[in-house]
Image: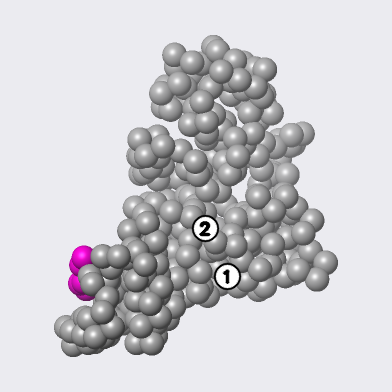
Amino acid sequence: MAVAAVGVSGCAPRPVGRVRPASTIHVEAISKRFGTTRALDRVDLDVDAGRVLGLLGPNGAGKTTLVRVLTTLLKPDAGRAVVAGYDVVRDAASLRSVIGLAGQYATVDELLTGRENLELVGLLYHLNRAEYRQRAQEALELLSLVDAGDKQVRTYSGGMRRRLDLGASLIGRPPVLFLDEPTTGLDPRTRNDLWQFVENLVAEGTTVLLTTQYMEEAEHLADGIVVIDGGTVVAQGTADELKDRLGGDVLEARVSDRADLARAISILSDIATTPPRVDTDLKRISIPTKGGAKMLIAAGRLLDDNGIALEDLGIRRPSLDDVFLAITGQAPGTDSSDLDPTVNKRALK
């Protein structure tokens, strides 16, 4: 979806001051409640120009609520946010002309062709006919949709609709782009294509705020990462800085017999500092450890003494998934407890 400025006058308000010179997105103590539900609680963050910030958190943690505030779709209860120099409340109309938004679900008109969808967004941005036609063609080319451009969108696959929705968010050539879980449900090839597309945009100077449930996506695209849980920022830094917070490595054990998995989890939980991460399909248990080889040997002996046969046992460097679990106590994609009851819960991820 593109956030277009409808009825914007030719004279935009002057951008507000007292924001870091390089900060394109500045969020200061933003709070939002829905009844008794706390969606955001004094959230602070900054995104520098031409950078990608990955916003991570369990489902319902407040990520989409924050995106809706920053794109003028919701008014905060308290705090202040400035995007591209414009206050998100005071200068909402003018701000919409310089941002793009691609939400979790493609918001395209199935009865129109792909080209017509893009040209319609150009009209909403008050582009003249030559401009919106040229930009629609450019978007179709960039997203490999030229062959399908004059077909009705109802014939498109899910991946094609997602690409078209992203193209619509770019028609206004926004300097700031919000991507709310843009690759959810896409096949790996289409996801990689979108990653490359985002990288190209950033190389040209676009600033991106990205929410995602894919830790690999955050590590691949984001210059910095903010983890939000229960509407509060609980950690931030680069991927490497967040991994260093675990203060060690990750011990992984894979049992031979699935029937032994529950017992192995119980045994390793006793020596873990955080809840183990379990992959039942692979019969694999992962726990953070600071003991290195000594912990590896101790875990192997414990499991062997209890008659649990292993297919594999080893130590590796932490991943963002490990960090996410350690910080939030939940695996990526699981539900948080503070979903916004007044908005479609599927959209608050």
- Going 41% across and 37% down the picture, which residue do you hit? 187
Q: Dot 1 corresponds to which residue?
A: 229
Nearer the N terminus, badge 2 or badge 1?
Answer: 1
Q: Which residues, given as a range, are shown in magenta? A: 311-317
Task: Give the number of the disc on residue 333.
Answer: 2
The residue type indicated by label 2 comes to: Gly
The residue type indicated by label 1 comes to: Asp
Is 205 displayed left or right of 10 in the figure?
Answer: left
Question: Which residue occupies the foreground of this view, 79 or 218?
Answer: 218
Residue 52 % position (x, y):
43, 54
Task: Give the number of the disc on residue 294.
Answer: none
- Going 52% across and 58% down the picture, which residue do you hit? 333
- Going 45% across and 21% down the picture, which residue do you hit? 145
Residue 201 % position (x, y):
41, 40
Does residue 315 belong to the magenta stretch? yes
Q: What element carries label 1?
A: strand
Tell me the quarter of the picture where residue 103 sits.
Answer: top right
